[in-house]
Image (cartoon, rainbow, N blue to C red):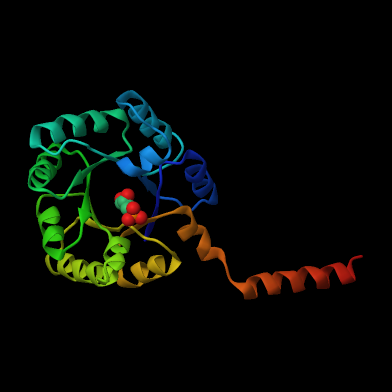
Amino acid sequence: MKFFIDTANLDQIKEAEALGVLDGVTTNPSLMAKEGITGRNNILKHYVDICNSVEGDVSAEVIATDFEGIIKEGEELAELHEQIVVKVPMIKDGVKALKYFSDKGIRTNCTLVFSVGQAILAAKAGATYVSPFIGRLDDISTDGLQLIADIRQIYDNYAFETQILAASVRHTMHVIDCAKIGADVMTGPLSSITGLLNHPLTDIGLEKFLADYNKGNS
Ligand code: E4P
């Protein structure tokens, strides 16, 4: 399973990259705003800065919601850097745009997916990635992981090539459960990646090994 980090914070992106397990980055307008990145030119420059900080795909989201606007914005984003993947919302004009981009060889990430029906449409339109938001489903007492499992089964039934990008991951158990189900990618905060390191027996074991070494070598 590929690991993407879901942030526009360059320090966190660099920290995850330095760990050596990062495969890409996802952003969205809220994450860009959280970092204080505003204004079209600053936003475009920030995408390039992110691309220059990591190896792998960087999702950059369009703001337009009409077909022509999505195409214009998406083409501009795709031209910024070869690592850019154009993030398109799951709306009617978004689906049309996914097909257009797919025919043009521009890679896409279909975002704001909350149902299997939406995931089928994204795959049929040729999306590179589909992003079901599991945390936001859990927030409304709906099983986000079950959605990942259902999409996995359907995509496997028809050998759809669209990759399942489990999004809105909130914690380490989401990561582990997505891996069990067979999601192709997960995107979450830095803590969902670094949290996988932690185990008290590792800490206790290391402390004992070092204490025993020091007893014999002091
Ligand atoms: C996906 O690409 C989104 O940026 C993201 O995962 C949304 O996560 P949230 O529900 O924690 O905001």
Q: Residue at x 42, y 34 (%)?
A: 36
Q: Residue at x 25, y 72 (%)?
A: 146
Question: Could you tell me how many numbered marks the image carries?
Answer: 0
Image x and y of residue 103, in percent: 11, 40
Mark yes or no: residue 16 visible: yes
Q: Is residue 117 left or right of residue 36?
A: left
Q: Residue at x 33, y 38 (%)?
A: 83
Look at the picture and state if 84 lies above or below 153: above
Mark yes or no: residue 58 visible: no
Residue 173: quadrant of the picture:
bottom left
Image x and y of residue 52, in percent: 43, 33
Residue 204: quadrant of the picture:
bottom right
The quarter in which the C terminus is drawn is bottom right
The quarter in which the N terminus is drawn is bottom left
Q: Residue at x 9, y 54 (%)?
A: 124
Look at the picture and state if 177 lies above or below 101: below
